[in-house]
């Protein structure tokens, strides 16, 4: 279960994404009800999940990379499309590599996150950007907006 501090961090995080054949973009939380224009050709919903730092234990980059590769292997085995995504705390240097999975339900996304030791996943729809707990019924709904991708070194 996520601490209150962790949950607050999840709700303010931004996510850089690079769908195939598209320019990279950043998804930022916005006030509830405020949304941008849904990208053409992107199946919905989109779940963003990581395998980094399970149970909020910060691992070394090599261990996180191995965990991320296992997540990629699982998605590939399940026949699920995915593309790179990096979640960032806009107030610090903290980031976690993950994957955006179009067409996956929030319920299935939370189960996927749970299998990889995660406290929460993100579910993006035309109407909302939602942080969904993998351990209980908690969720936080906000709006969203897209901005041009900002290149940042991890």
Image (tube, helix red, strand yellow):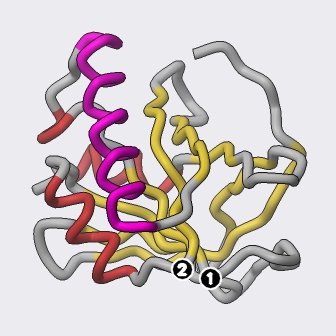
Q: Is residue 41 left or right of residue 7?
A: right
Residue 144 visible somewhere in the drawing: yes
Q: Kindly state the secondary structure of the residue where label 1 is placed.
A: loop
Q: Is residue 12 left or right of residue 29?
A: left
Q: Which mark is residue 44?
A: 1
Q: From the viewer's perspective, is residue 88 above or below residue 141?
A: above
Residue 120 percent location from the top left of the image: 29, 59
Residue under the image location 82 percent in, 77 percent down: 41
Residue under the image location 35 percent in, 33 percent down: 69
Q: Is residue 63 magenta?
A: yes
| Residue 149: quadrant of the picture | top right
Q: Earlier in the sequence, mark 2 or mark 1?
A: 1
Badge 1, how many Cα within 10 Å: few under 14, some, many 20+? some
Q: Is residue 139 left or right of residue 147?
A: left
Q: Is residue 111 left or right of residue 154?
A: left
Residue under the image location 60 percent in, 35 percent down: 90
Badge 2, how many Cα within 10 Å: few under 14, some, many 20+? some
Which residue is nearer to you in this view: 8 or 105? 105
Position of the C terminus, as image quadrant, is top right
Mark pair 2, 1: CA separation? 5 Å
Q: Kindly state the secondary structure of the residue where label 2 is placed.
A: loop
Residue assigned mark 2: 103
Residue 129 visible somewhere in the drawing: no
Question: Contact (CB < 8 A) between labels 2 and 1?
Answer: yes
Residue 78 percent location from the top left of the image: 34, 66
Please identify the dominant SS of the magenta region.
Answer: helix
Residue under the image location 56 percent in, 81 percent down: 45
Q: Which mark is residue 101?
A: none
Q: Is residue 74 magenta?
A: yes
Position of the N terminus, as image quadrant, is bottom left
Write down the region rendered in magenta.
60-79
| Residue 107: quadrant of the picture | bottom left
């Amino acid at each position: 279960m996520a601490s209150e501090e962790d949950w607050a961090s999840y709700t303010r995080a931004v996510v850089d994404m690079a769908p195939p054949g598209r320019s990279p973009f950043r998804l930022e939380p916005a006030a509830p009800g405020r949304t941008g224009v849904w990208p053409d050709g992107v199946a919905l919903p989109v779940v963003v999940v990581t395998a980094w730092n399970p149970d909020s234990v910060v691992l070394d980059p090599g261990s996180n990379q191995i965990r991320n590769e296992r997540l990629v292997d699982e998605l590939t085995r399940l026949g699920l499309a995915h593309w790179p995504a990096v979640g960032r705390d806009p107030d610090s240097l903290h980031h976690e590599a993950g994957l955006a999975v179009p067409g996956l339900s929030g319920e299935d996304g939370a189960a996927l996150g749970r299998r990889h030791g995660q406290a929460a996943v993100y579910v993006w729809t035309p109407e909302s950007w939602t942080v969904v707990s993998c351990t209980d019924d908690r969720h936080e709904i906000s709006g969203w907006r897209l901005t041009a991708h900002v290149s940042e070194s991890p």
